[in-house]
Amino acid sequence: MKKLIPFINSLAFMLTFLGLNSQEINKECITQVPKNIDQIEEESRDTYNFYINQYYEKLNNKSSTAITQIPAKLHIVTNSSGYTSVTVDEILDELQEANIDLADSFLEVYICDEINYIANDQLYEFDISNQNLLYQNHQSNIMNIYFVEEIDFGDGAACGYTYFGGALNGNGDPEQYYDTVVMRNNCIGYDRNTLVHEFGHHFNLYHTHGDGTPAEYVNGVNCNSAGDFLCDTPADPQLSSSTVSNINCLYSGNETDPLGTVYDPDTSNYMSYAPQSCRDNFSPMGNARMFAAFHTFRSYYECPSFNVDILSDQIADCDNYMSVNFTDASVGATAWEWDVDGDDIIDYYEQNPNHIYSPGTYDVTLKISNGEETLTKVFPQYVNFTSNIYDTSKVNLKLMIIDLNENTWEFTDSNNNIIYEGGPYDQNGEYTHELEINQSECYTFTIYDTAGNGLDSSNWMVGNEYYELTTESGDLIHTNTNFGEEESVLISTQNLNIVDISLNSLFIYPNPAENYIQIKYQNTVPNSFKIFDINGRRIHHKEINSEADLIFNTTNLVKGMYFISIQISEKNKRLKFIVK
Ligand SMILES: [Ca+2]
Ligand SMILES: [Ca+2]
Ligand SMILES: [Ca+2]
Ligand SMILES: [Ca+2]
Ligand SMILES: [Zn+2]
């Protein structure tokens, strides 16, 4: 019996020690990386890479640097008598801190509409086994942020967790169960940054030490395929308060990577497990990844009462211009600021502007206001207009047909005369057609599918359906499979500089203008022109008596949008132009 006492004592000591210790090493975060995240990201690889590139375009000031605001629904869980240890101000302060860092990803999270209070003792002292009960409070199509007093799991407790983006439900739609961030009340405040860490995960950042991913080597050779898959974050053995000093933030461990090299980790990265007081940044590639993950996987988030959305009609013409009629589809807006070409300069204040584009890719940014608050959303590369002018004397059409008797096409000139037509095809396989064309003409190729499903069939013997239009030198004009019932492609052979002007069609060049604009005409010389600013004020009037009068110097104009009204044979043609 005597011997038992010290044993019991030491057991009690051990229990106390373990208890204290587990309190100390309570996990910051129990975000789990989906097992099939590789597959999820691989399936969206093109979109993802598109946005990664887009991110670097922003850094090079080649596209809109406006910040997209992401709506979040805030749920504050209280005990059954309505008590919680956290205040709304504390939460908003923490959010503001997080947004300072998200700004480098051109993102910002804001609270949409009223806070939802949930009075429930069981959920206040939350255990992850009650997830389904908590998530019943989800609002759809939005980030749901819950604040609870405890996040217990098994024998541990955590500061927060969330889910990576990109998981789909059985219908192929985003799995909204995962539109969640759960935060423990006492994990916000000074020197705490779990919230921004969870935002990192929410936008598909891994821990810098990886999450069951292959070990990243210190020499960086496998940085693309291991650890956090980011090459600007050094290999990380999984830091902790026992290997990183919270005084000087130096790593004192002596762990080695699989090649035997001692780690030299970054203890300042938000996605590491270094002490929170040491962490103050995401890496630049991490910022790019968050931007891409938001736009690839979570851009459907919207605030029901106040939301930015746009629709458009895009009509290309034969003279290398495309007219785009924008329709505001926002909710709750009373004022609009459009930057339709991604140069960070507002072009229109009207609700539904029209803009004329020259070939290129352009971000469209719409900032709306409801009189009290504003909301901004960037639509990266929303307008993607490639020149429809080709230097060729024939067009090659190739079709791969599997579904029989569904497809016909026609090739018309600018007077709507059908020059060529083909189909329906009653045998599968490849068909090619050579279409001879004239210069200074504008043709329309239209393909039809009576089944309404485009060329979407495939057959292991024959291959995949598609069609393709190329020039005589083999340059691609257009290819597609997914066009529903029909689609049209404009193919112009007009020379780029000498624009053909039909009777009631005049053009100005260049647009946007840097130093001047020139009126282009054919046959009939215009009589005069007037220039108006965006507010409709006339700022210039000129009679045209010589070729020199067709050139208007724009160097004295401030940057922005202008109108020119050109009078010809008693008619007026009104055009918009931009001064850069
Ligand atoms: Ca903080
Ligand atoms: Ca890395
Ligand atoms: Ca602009
Ligand atoms: Ca079809
Ligand atoms: Zn984490």
Image: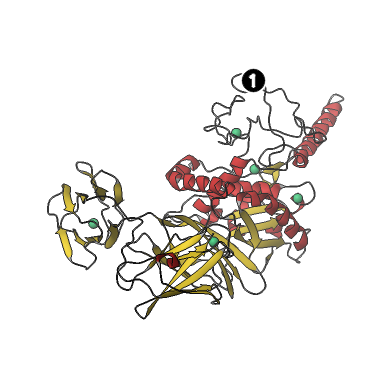
Is 157 rendered above or below residue 501? above
Which sits in the foreground, 548 or 448?
548
Give the SS element for disc 1.
Answer: loop
Q: Is mark 1 within 8 Å of ligand 2?
A: no
The answer to which quarter of the image holds residue 69 is bottom right
Q: Position of residue 340 (x, y in %)?
A: 51, 62
Query: Viewed as shown, does residue 101 lie left or right of 543?
Result: right
Q: Position of residue 36 (x, y in %)?
A: 48, 42
Residue that sits furthest to the left in the current view:
426
The answer to which quarter of the image holds residue 508 is bottom left
Task: State the scheme by which the image is colored.
Answer: secondary structure
Residue at 64% of width from left, 20% of height from top?
261
- Which quarter of the frame holds ligand 2? top right
User: Residue 312, can we see it?
Assistant: no
* Residue bearing the label numbered 1: 261
Query: Viewed as shown, does residue 312 lie left or right of 319?
Result: right
Position of the C terminus by quadrant = bottom right
Q: Position of residue 572 (x, y in %)?
A: 39, 77
Amino acid bearing label 1: Thr
Q: Position of residue 307 (x, y in %)?
A: 56, 67
Is 520 rendered above or below residue 537? above
User: Residue 334, can we see it?
Assistant: yes
